[in-house]
Image (cartoon, helix red, strand yellow):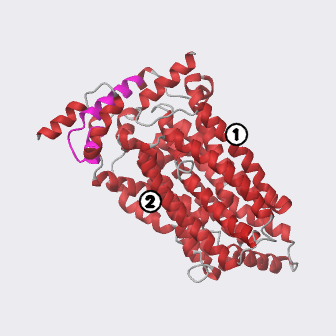
C-alpha cells in the first residue's frame, strides 16, 4: 500500500462524515460499478422513457388507423370526442400500469431482491411487445392499450427497483450522481423515441416496429445484469448474509479495502435489528417516518403536476396548437428531447455540488415563471409569429429547469430519506403516487386542453408555485449525509 493510499484511509477516520467521503471518490468509482449501473439503468429506465415519448410523433397516423378500425366495425365515422377519449386512454393506461407496478415494488424488492426483481420484470416487456406488434394485423387498438398496460407495470416496477439498486450499490459521495443516472437514461430514451418516431424513420405506418423496439433494452439487461451482484445492503440488512455482502461490495469497488463501508452497513444492520420492519400503518403513524413520507410523496406529486409529462406526451400537438407547421412542430419536439438529455447530464455534476434542495428550488421557481409566460404566448400565437417562436423558447427553458433537478432528484430522494427497514414500502407508495399523478395528467390534459385551450397551463402554474413554497419550508438537504444521519435528523424533528 503506498503512502498516498494510507493517507486517504487515515483521513477516512475523521469524525465528520462529509469530510471522510471525499477522499474515497477516486478509489470508489470503478469499471465494475459503471457496468452494474449500466446493466440496471439502461435495461429499465429505457422502458420508462421510451414508452413515455414513443406515441408523440406517430399520434396522427395512429389516430387515423384507429378511426378506420372504428368505422369498419360500426359503419359509422366516430366523433372527434370519441377518438380523443380513446387516444387518451391508450396514452394514460401506461401510467395506470405504472401505478400497479409501483404498488408491487416493495413486495418484489423484499422477496426477489433488487437485482432479481429487475430481471423477472422483463417478462412484462415480452408480453407488451407481442400485444403491440399483433395489434395492427388483428385490427385491434385494444391490444395496443393492453400492451401499454403491461409495459406500464414493467416501468412502474423499474421506477422503484432501479433507483433502489443504484442507491444501494453507490458510495455515499456519489449517491446523488449515480441516482441521477436513472433520469438520464429516461431522457435519452425519450429522445431516441422521438427520433425513431419521425415519419421517414419508423414513424408513419411503421409504428408497430417503433413500439416493438422496446424489446432491445430488455434483452440487454437479461444478458448483462446476471453478471452483477445483488446489492450489498440487501444481502446484509435484509438477508443477514455478511460474507456475500462483503463479496458483492468488493466486486463493485474493485478492491478488498471495503472495511469502512462494511462497518457502516454493520452499524445500520444493528440499528435495523432493534427496529421492527416498517409496516404501511407505521409509515403514517410514526412521526419519524411520516415526515419523510410526506416529503417523498409531495415531491413525486409535484414532479408530475409540474406539467412535464403533459409536454412530453403532447409536445408535438402543443407546438401545432401554437400554429407551427407540422414538420416544424416535430423538429421542435426533437430539439426539446435533445436539450433534456444534455441538461440531465449537467445535473449529474450539479447535484453533488449545488445540493438537492437548491436545485429543486431553482427548478420549481423558474418553471412557475416560465409556464406563466407560456400561457400568454400560446394565447397570442395565432396572430403573432413572434409569440409562436417564443412558445418554443419557453418550452426549451422549461426543459432546462426541469432537467437540472426536479426531473431526477425525487426518484433517488426517496431512497435517501428512509433506512433499510422502511425503504421498500416507502418506495412503493412514492412510485405509485408518481404514476397516479402521471395517469391523471395523461388522461386529463387533452380533455381539459380541448375545453379551455392554453388556460390549462394555469393549473400547472398553481401547482408549481405551491411546490416551490413546500420545498423551501420542508425539504432537507441530504447531500453527503449517510442514511443513519438523515434518519436521526427526522427522529429529532419528530420529538420537537
Using residue 184 as the reference point, say whether residue 89 is left or right of it: right
Q: Quadrant of the N terminus?
A: top left
Q: Position of residue 465 (x, y in %)?
A: 70, 42
Nearest-to-viewer mark from 2 and 1? 1
Above or below: residue 253 compared with residue 86: above
Is 51 or 129 nearer to us in this picture? 51
Using residue 411 as the reference point, say whether residue 297 is left or right of it: right
* Label drawn at residue 466: 1
Using residue 359 as the reference point, say whether residue 377 is left or right of it: right
Above or below: residue 34 compared with residue 392: above
Magenta: predominant secondary structure element? helix
Is 155 or 409 nearer to us in this picture? 409
The answer to whether residue 281 is visible is: yes
The residue carrying mark 2 is 42
Q: Is residue 74 magenta?
A: no
Quadrant for residue 48, please give it.
bottom right
At mark 2, the secondary structure is helix
Q: Residue at x 72, y 70 (%)?
A: 386
Is 194 or 239 nearer to us in this picture? 194
Query: What span is colored magenta in the figure?
Result: 245-271
Residues at discs 2 and 1 in contact (Cβ within 8 Å): no
Q: Position of residue 400 (x, y in %)?
A: 56, 57
Using residue 11 as the reference point, say whether residue 470 is left or right of it: right
Amino acid at each position: 500500500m503506498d503512502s498516498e493510499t494510507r493517507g486517504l484511509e487515515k483521513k477516512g477516520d475523521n469524525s465528520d462524515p462529509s469530510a471522510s467521503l471525499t477522499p474515497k471518490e477516486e478509489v470508489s468509482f470503478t469499471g465494475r460499478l459503471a457496468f452494474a449501473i449500466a446493466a440496471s439503468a439502461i435495461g429499465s429506465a429505457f422502458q420508462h422513457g421510451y414508452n413515455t415519448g414513443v406515441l408523440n410523433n406517430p399520434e396522427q397516423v395512429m389516430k387515423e388507423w384507429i378511426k378506420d378500425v372504428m368505422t369498419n366495425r360500426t359503419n359509422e365515422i366516430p366523433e372527434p370526442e370519441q377518438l380523443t377519449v380513446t387516444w387518451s386512454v391508450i396514452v394514460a393506461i401506461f401510467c395506470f400500469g405504472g401505478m400497479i407496478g409501483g404498488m408491487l415494488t416493495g413486495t418484489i424488492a423484499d422477496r426477489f431482491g433488487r437485482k432479481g426483481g429487475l430481471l423477472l420484470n422483463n417478462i412484462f416487456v415480452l408480453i407488451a411487445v407481442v400485444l403491440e406488434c399483433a395489434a395492427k394485423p388483428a385490427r385491434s387498438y385494444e391490444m395496443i392499450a393492453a400492451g401499454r398496460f403491461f409495459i406500464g407495470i414493467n416501468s412502474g416496477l423499474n421506477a422503484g427497483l432501479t433507483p433502489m439498486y443504484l442507491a444501494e450499490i453507490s458510495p455515499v459521495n456519489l449517491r446523488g450522481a449515480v441516482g441521477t443516472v436513472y433520469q438520464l437514461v429516461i431522457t435519452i430514451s425519450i429522445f431516441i423515441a422521438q427520433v425513431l418516431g419521425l415519419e421517414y424513420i419508423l414513424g408513419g405506418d411503421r409504428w408497430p416496429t417503433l413500439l416493438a423496439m422496446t424489446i432491445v433494452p430488455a434483452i440487454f439487461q437479461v444478458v448483462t445484469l446476471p453478471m452483477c451482484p445483488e446489492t450489498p445492503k440487501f444481502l446484509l440488512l435484509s438477508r443477514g448474509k455478511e460474507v456475500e455482502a462483503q463479496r458483492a461490495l468488493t466486486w463493485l469497488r474493485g478492491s478488498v479495502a471495503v472495511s469502512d463501508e462494511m462497518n457502516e452497513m454493520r452499524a445500520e444492520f444493528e440499528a435495523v435489528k432493534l427496529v421492527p420492519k416498517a409496516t404501511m400503518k407505521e409509515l403514517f403513524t410514526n412521526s419519524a417516518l411520516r415526515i419523510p413520507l410526506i416529503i417523498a410523496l409531495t415531491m413525486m406529486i409535484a414532479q408530475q403536476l409540474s406539467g412535464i409529462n403533459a409536454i412530453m406526451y403532447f409536445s408535438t400537438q402543443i407546438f401545432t396548437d401554437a400554429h407551427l407547421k407540422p414538420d416544424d412542430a416535430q423538429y421542435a419536439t426533437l430539439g426539446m428531447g435533445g436539450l433534456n438529455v444534455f441538461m440531465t447530464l449537467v445535473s449529474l455534476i450539479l447535484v453533488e455540488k449545488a445540493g438537492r434542495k437548491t436545485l429543486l428550488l431553482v427548478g420549481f421557481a423558474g418553471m412557475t415563471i416560465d409556464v406563466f409566460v407560456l400561457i400568454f404566448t400560446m394565447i397570442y400565437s395565432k396572430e403573432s409569429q413572434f409569440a409562436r417562436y417564443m412558445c418554443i423558447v419557453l418550452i426549451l427553458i422549461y426543459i432546462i429547469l426541469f432537467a437540472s433537478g426536479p426531473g431526477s432528484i425525487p426518484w433517488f430522494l426517496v431512497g435517501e430519506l428512509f433506512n433499510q427497514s422502511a425503504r421498500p414500502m416507502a418506495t412503493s407508495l412514492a412510485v405509485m403516487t408518481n404514476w397516479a399523478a402521471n395517469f391523471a395528467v395523461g388522461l386529463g390534459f387533452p380533455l381539459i386542453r380541448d375545453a379551455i385551450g392554453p388556460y390549462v397551463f394555469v393549473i400547472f402554474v398553481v401547482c408549481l408555485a405551491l411546490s416551490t413554497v413546500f420545498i423551501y419550508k420542508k425539504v432537507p438537504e441530504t447531500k453527503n449525509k449517510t442514511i443513519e444521519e438523515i434518519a436521526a435528523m427526522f427522529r429529532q424533528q419528530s420529538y420537537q
